[in-house]
Image: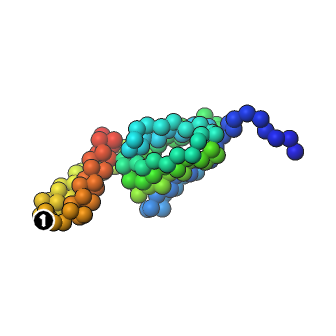
């Protein structure tokens, strides 16, 4: 069996959420908006790991189709032959219920205002959740 020479031309793309939504494709390119900035991934990419607060993930499959999803609260793991994205939730563009997220942010801010200064861990957790939900709203609009 002859060995392949050169860089690979495709990779696996796997997207899964805690709510059971998932997507998988053979991809030529993947683009991810991470907490550290946007990253483009081609087959053969070096291994890396990033967190995702809220952002778009775009996959260009081997047939040239582009798949774009808005994802919330998770990570992307990159290997030379696979890109795995695991998130709390996956949305189609335009699917986010903006009013519901705004209500959730208001409730979180109200809860935050009732905490004592000694409740630093809970305060930090709520502040992080508010920040992620505000990022989701910015992306959804």
Q: How packed is label 1: few (under 14 Cα within 10 Å), some, or many (20 or more)?
A: few
**Where is residue 50 shown, x and y percent of the image?**
45, 47
Q: Residue at x 51, y 36 (%)?
A: 40
Q: Is residue 81 left or right of residue 4?
A: left
Residue marked by disc 1: 116
In this figure, which colouring scheme has been used for the structure? rainbow
Q: Nearer the viewer, residue 62 or 134?
A: 134
One can see residue 91 in this view: no
- SS state under label 1: loop
One can see residue 36 in this view: yes
Q: Residue at x 17, y 60 (%)?
A: 112
Q: Is residue 112 left or right of residue 137?
A: left
Residue 127: quadrant of the picture = bottom left
Q: Residue at x 52, y 50 (%)?
A: 77
**Where is residue 43 shown, x and y percent of the image?**
63, 39
Q: Residue at x 79, y 38 (%)?
A: 4
Q: Quadrant of the C terminus?
A: top left
Residue 114: quadrant of the picture = bottom left
Name the outermost residue toward the right.
1
Q: Quadrant of the N terminus?
A: top right
Q: How many marks?
A: 1
**Where is residue 68 shown, x and y percent of the image?**
47, 41
**Where is residue 83 shown, x and y percent of the image?**
56, 47
């Amino acid at each position: 069996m002859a060995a392949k020479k050169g860089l690979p031309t495709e990779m696996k793309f796997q997207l899964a959420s805690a709510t059971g939504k998932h997507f998988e494709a053979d991809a030529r390119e993947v683009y991810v908006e991470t907490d550290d900035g946007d990253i483009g991934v081609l087959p053969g990419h070096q291994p890396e790991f990033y967190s995702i607060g809220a952002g778009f993930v775009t996959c260009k499959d081997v047939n040239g189709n582009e798949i774009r999803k808005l994802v919330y609260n998770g990570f992307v793991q990159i290997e030379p032959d696979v890109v795995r994205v695991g998130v709390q939730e996956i949305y189609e563009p335009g699917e986010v219920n903006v009013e519901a997220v705004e209500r959730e942010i208001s409730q979180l801010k109200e809860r935050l205002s009732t905490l004592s200064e000694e409740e630093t861990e809970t305060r930090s957790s709520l502040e992080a959740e508010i920040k992620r939900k505000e990022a989701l709203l910015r992306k959804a609009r």
